[in-house]
Amino acid sequence: MRRPPLRHAGRARQHGEGPVWLFDLDNTLHNASDRVFAALNVAMTAYIERHLGVDTAQANCLRRLYWARYGATLTGLVRHHGIDAAHFLAETHALPGMEAHLHGHAHDLAALARLPGRKFLLTNGPAAYAWRVLRAVGLGHAFEGVIALEQMAMFGQLRPKPDRRMFRHVLARLRVQPTRCVLVEDSLMHQKAARSLGLRTVWVQRWTKASVHGPEAHLPLRRRPSYVDQRVHGLGALRWRALVHATGPSGRGFP
C-alpha cells in the first residue's frame, strides 16, 4: 500500500494524541444515490460486457456479485478475469458532467472544521473521482489526504473496505491506535469490520434509505447495531465528546 498523500503535515503534528477521523465519500459526504451510483452502475456493466464478452444480464450479475463479495466490483474483475485496474477505473469513472449534479453545503464544511484531530478520506473509489467530488461539494481542503482504492493494494491484491488487513495497514501508516481512530460511514459492513479491530464507528444515515441494497438490504435501519458507537443524520451531529465516552468491545471508553 502506498503512503496516502498528506497535506498540512505541520498542522497535523500539532494535534498530538487527538483523534484521527476516516470519512467515507459516497452517501456519507454527498448524495451518490441521486445520480452518481446509477451512472457508475451503467458504466461498469457496459465495461464488463465489452471486456468479458457477456450480455447485459450476466454483466449486471458479475458487477453485483463482486461488489457484495469483495467490497468493490473491480477487485473481483482483477482477481478472476485479469482486468487492468487503472483502465477500468479510468473508463468507468469518467462520468462527464457529474459535477453539475453534485451539491455541497456550507454547514458540512463548518462541521468538519469544528472536529478536533486529523481528517482523511477513506474511499473504495479511485483517487481522481474522489478529488472531483470533494472539489464539487466544496470539501477539497477539508482533509489532509485521500486514501483511495489505488492505495488499498497489498501484496499484489486489492483490499478495499471492509477488508480488515487494509484497516490495519491504514492505522499503521497513520501511526494511530484503533481507539483513537473514528470511521464515519454509511455502510454497516465496513463499520462492523472496523469495530472488530477497535476503531470507533459513526453511522451516517442522511442518505441511507436511498442507498441500502445488495448485502445490506436486509439490515435494520432504525436500530443502532452494537458495533456502531454513534448514529447521526448528518455531519453536523458529529460529537467527539460523545465518542470519548463510547464503550468499545473491551467495555472501556477511550484511554
Image (cartoon, rainbow, N blue to C red):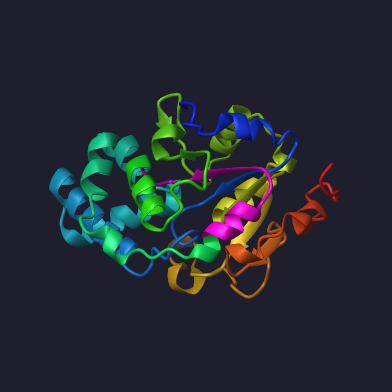
Give the total number of marks visible in the rendering. Answer: 0
Which image quadrant: the C terminus?
A: top right
Q: Position of residue 11 (x, y in %)?
A: 62, 34
> At 40% across and 25% down in the image, what residue appears?
156
The segment highlighted magenta reads 109-126
Q: Is residue 125 magenta?
A: yes
The answer to whether residue 196 is above or below residue 205 is: above
Q: Position of residue 112 (x, y in %)?
A: 59, 54
Whether residue 78 is visible, yes or no, is: yes
Q: Position of residue 233 (x, y in %)?
A: 59, 70
Task: Left or right? Give the position of 90 relative to 216.
Answer: left
**Relative to the observer, which residue lies in front, 176 or 237?**
237
Q: Position of residue 114 (x, y in %)?
A: 65, 55
**Relative to the observer, which residue lies in front, 8 or 117?**
8
Task: Left or right? Give the position of 148 relative to 162.
Answer: left
The answer to whether residue 230 is above or below residue 92 is: below
Task: Left or right? Give the position of 116 relative to 8.
Answer: right
Quarter of the image for residue 238 reads bottom right
The answer to whether residue 227 is above or below residue 143 is: below
> At 83% across and 55% down in the image, what residue appears?
245
